[in-house]
Amino acid sequence: MLQSPLTATLRPWLRTAAVTACLIISGCTSFQRSSLHTAAVSMRGTAASSPRVASRRDASSALAGARPFAWANVAATASGEELQTVKVGNGGFRTLIVGSVGGHDPLAVGLTEDLARYLHGNSVIVGGIESTILRTLNPDGLRRQKYRNAAGIYLNDQFPSDGSMLDHHEFVQLPEEVQFVMQYIEEHQPQRIIHIRSVKGNEGLIAASRGAMKSAREVSDWLDFKLQQLPESVRGTTLEAWASQRDHCDVVTFGIPRNTDKADVWPLYSDAIVSLMQDGDTESRQIARWKKQRRARRGRPNSRSSAVDMFNDDTARGRYTTPFE
C-alpha cells in the first residue's frame, strides 16, 4: 500500500503518542486502586485497634463484668461467726454504715441489708459517695437471738471513753468485734458513721455529732423523730461516744421505733438513711411532702412486738442496770 509523505512522517509520532497515552491511563488506574485499597486497609486497622470504636462484644463484656451482690467475710468473732461487709463506690464522701451493735435487732439489720442491696444496684444514681456497709457488729447475737455476743458481752459498752485507740496491750483485751470496727475506722477514716438500730416505743430517735447536726435536724423534722446531740447524750463507752470524739468523722445514730411493722421499715426510712449519707447537702426538703403519708403509716403496731424485746437504751446518759433481754 502506498503511503503519503505526511502519513509516513506522522506515523512514528502517532505510535509514540498512543503508547504514552496507554501508559498514563494504566498508571493512573493502578495508582487510584492502590491508594483506595491502602486507605481501606488502614481504616479497618484503625477501627479494630481504636478504643473509641464500640462493638457489641465490648458492650456485652461490660455488662458481664457487673458483679452480683454478695457479702464479704472480712473478720470473725471468737466463736467463729463472720463479720460481713459490702463496699459500694470508690472515692468521694466516705460513709460507714454499721448495722445494729445489738445483733438481735431484726428491724435494724433488715434495713441495713436492704440498704446494702439498694446501694449495690444503684451505685451510679447514688454517686459521689464511698460506702461500706457492716451487716451487724454482733453476728453472734444475730445467730443466737441475743443482745450479747457468744462470750456474754454487751458490745456497746466496750469502747474507750475518750476517743483514743489504746495501746496494744489494752487494745487486744477488747472483744474481737470492737477491735475490728475501731481498727477499720482508724485505717479508713470514714467521714460519717451511721449506726442503724431500733429504740423502744413508737417514737424514733436521731442522735448526731455537731458536724452532722444539720442533716440530722432536717431528717428528724420530716420524720418527727426525737433529736439528740452526740456525744453528750450517750454513755461514754458506746461506739457513738467514742467515734464522735475523733477528729476526722461525724456520727449519726438512726433509731427505728420498735413498734414499726417490719414491712414498713424500708418504705418509711430508706430515703432518710440515704439522705444522712450525704455531706450535708441532703434531699430532705424535696421529700418533705411525703411527711403526712409517713406519719399516717407509722402508727401501725408490730404484731410481733410483744415477743421482740429491745437491747439496752444506750441513748440514756449513765449506765444501765439490767439488760433488756
Image: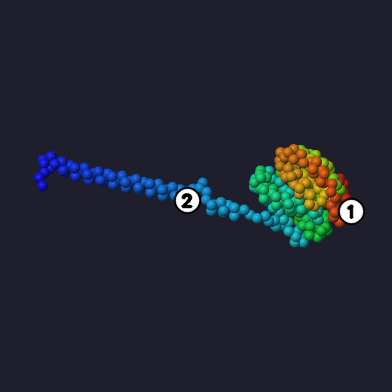
Q: Relative to residue 213, is residue 238 depicted above or below? A: below
Q: Relative to residue 103, is residue 191 depicted above or below? A: above
How many other residues sit within 10 Å of disc 1, few (<14), some (14-19) or many (≥20)? few
Which residue lies under the disc numbered 1? 322
Residue that protrudes farthest toward the bottom in the picture: 79
The spot of residue 187 in percent (x, y) is 69, 49
Of 170 and 81, nearer the camera is: 81
Of 69 and 324, nearer the camera is: 69
Which residue lies under the disc numbered 2? 48
**Residue 211 seen from this side:** no
Task: Give the distance between the C-alpha atoms of the residues marked 1 and 2, in whole angstroms.
Answer: 72 Å
Q: Identity of the amino acid at label 1?
A: Thr
The spot of residue 103 in percent (x, y) is 79, 55
Of 213 and 166, nearer the camera is: 213
Give me the residue at 47% from left, 48% from top.
47
Are circles 1 and 2 on residues that touch, CB within 8 Å?
A: no
The spot of residue 183 in percent (x, y) is 72, 51
Quadrant the C terminus occupies: bottom right
Residue that protrudes farthest toward the front in the picture: 1
Give me the residue at 82% from left, 41% from top.
224
Q: Identity of the amino acid at label 2?
A: Ala
